[in-house]
Image (tube, grey):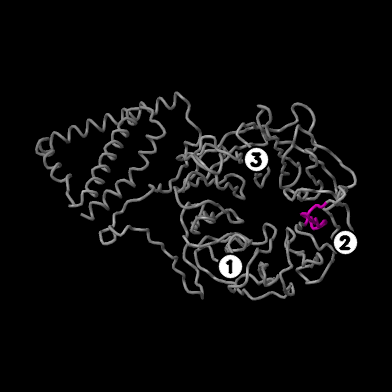
Amino acid sequence: MAPYTPLLTVRGSEGLYMVNGPPHFTESSVLPRESGKNCKVYTFSKDGTLFAWGNGEKINIINVTNKGLLHSFDLPKTVCLEFSPKNTVLATWQPYTTSKDGTAGVPNLQLYDVKTGTCLKAFIQKKMQNWCPFWSEDETICARNVNNEVHFFENNNFNTIANKLHLQKINDFVLSPGPQPYKVAVYVPGSKGAPSFVRLYQYPNFDGPHAALANKSFFKADKVTMLWNKKATAVLVIASTDVDKTGASYYGEQTLHYIATNGESAVVQLPKSGPIYDVVWNSNSTEFCAVYGFMPAKATIFNLKCDPVFDFGTGPRNAAYYSPHGHILVLAGFGNLRGQMEVWDVKNYKLISKPVASDSTYFAWCPDGEHILTATCAPRLRVNNGYKIWHYTGSVLHKYDVPSNVELWQVSWQPFLDGIFPAKTITYQAVPSELPREEPKTATAYRPPALRNKPTTNSKLHEEEPPQNMKPQPGNDKPLSKNALKNQRKHEAKKAAKQEARSDKSLDLSPTPTSQSSAQNTISQPTTGDPEVDKKIKNLKKKLKAIEQLKEQAATGKQLEKNQLEKIQKEKALLRELEDLELGI
């Protein structure tokens, strides 16, 4: 059997068409090119076998495998399309309109039977946000939010409401992925001094004071984003306020909460203050990655206990993307950042490549787990539109730039079910490409006219933190009890005392302190002729001396503060910086 090749769908002012995926990149015959600017929407089914699109006159459905047209519906104003998980129903949405005399408009959310083409049900859905009903993966239940209630339908029978979940004012809900038992997370915003809360329920047990599987309440929340893991055992909740009352951030304030279906909940402690840009689950459901903090942002992987496992340090990034198999993680800085990507092997925590996709507005992993799509699309950016196909090792395999008078609106991969593409061994060597390697444009910093003919200094606006493994050593997985911690400190203090005694003995055999200190003074006071560099060297030595004192305090069993521990972690970076400055003397 020939290997599967995911298709690429491209929509823009040139029309709608499909491209064969790697390694060919030729135009596909699955979809005859739809010319013109009238295509507003398209979608694939979850398994990638069906494709639906609107051309401004009709909504068409084709079978991707045999290229046959299945149905055509007269819905010229449709702007949203979605297939149910098992391809039974096609949901369509068009903007809700009312007549001039004030009478209610016609239902604008239609559900069509994909086999017969008949309309199963039509609802009034005024808002575009969360317009599509949520189905369970086996389509046994379907749910939608109606007037602050969640209505549940069973077996695609939309004429009878099988169950209702009614709370004070349900603002949002998310149905869990995976098989039975089905779970639902609901968000109720706070009012009149009462906190906002997220609750987890198991369908259909909604009644009674102890019906909720878990509950988490918080005050700082104007809106929330709820993210289930793949195994439906836990939900991550990003709670956001529109305004940061402290004035620290223009983008409001965010907090990250963890809620498990076994009733456990926690606030995820993020070491750096600032916005939360992105949070994403690994497909293995045992860890998640958060990108957070004022720029340069930190990125950290946490386990299900909300303990940090690996810290990627700081860098210009605002997004994280796990590969479909969960073995590779891409950290990227798009939008107002220059498009730098870091591709990491998350099993061994090794950096694979650092490509740069400048001006990118879209990123997507190919279902094969090997290729990456980046694109620059309108209306986010109306110049330099186009897309690139990368291998995760950093090679650009295919590039398409649209002509200057043309816009690219949307580009995406054909989806596939899990297990179609097996996970392959990670390679660190860049794969060969026919395209020439592009060197990213490096923007030089502005220098005032008075400094342009003078030597540059290595001053940095921010101190970058290096990546570090936060995993506990084997055998120390469980947190120590108070007594064990006390004993450990005593043991470490004794060890430090022994080492001091040994060093004292060695000092007796060494030259006299006066001659030694005078020799040290002559060596440790280099002059570069540049007072700026001399000052930096002096400050670095001060910092290193303070770190040595902190390490001695820790060895005697003293409990150090968080900021003191962070200082100790910076020792290697400071030593490197000192060495660089002294080498430049």
User: In the image, is 365 to the left or to the right of 18?
Assistant: left
Indicate whether 235 appears above or below 584.
above
From the viewer's side, name the closer residue of 499 and 385. Answer: 385
Residue, x 85% and y 57% (percent of image)?
Answer: 112
Circle 3 residue: 223
Disc 1 and disc 3: Cα gap in Å? 33 Å
Identify the magenta region.
83-97
Q: Is mark 2 on a helix, strand or loop?
A: loop
Disc 1 and disc 2: Cα gap in Å? 37 Å
Give the mark nearest the N terminus, 1 or 3.
3
Which quarter of the figure is the C terminus placed in?
bottom left
Circle 1 residue: 385
Indicate whether 242 appears above or below 66.
above
Predominant SS of the magenta segment: loop
Foreground label between 3 and 2: 3
User: In the image, is 81 to the left or to the right of 442?
Assistant: right
From the viewer's side, name the closer residue of 532 and 59. Answer: 532
Residue, x 55% and y 68% (percent of image)?
Answer: 384
Q: Which amino acid does label 1 sit on?
A: Asn
Q: What element carries label 3?
A: strand
Indicate whether 437 appears above or below 46.
below
**Crowd band around label 3 with a 10 angstrom C-alpha radius: few (<14), some (14–19), many (20+):** some
Q: Position of residue 307 (x, y in %)?
A: 52, 38
Residue 4 in sight: no
Q: Where is residue 20 in the image (x, y as percent from the top left)?
A: 65, 72
**Crowd band around label 2 with a 10 angstrom C-alpha radius: few (<14), some (14–19), many (20+):** some
Q: Which amino acid does label 3 sit on?
A: Lys
Foreground label between 1 and 2: 1
**Crowd band around label 1 with a 10 angstrom C-alpha radius: few (<14), some (14–19), many (20+):** many
Residue, x 17% and y 52% (percent of image)?
Answer: 529
Circle 2 residue: 117
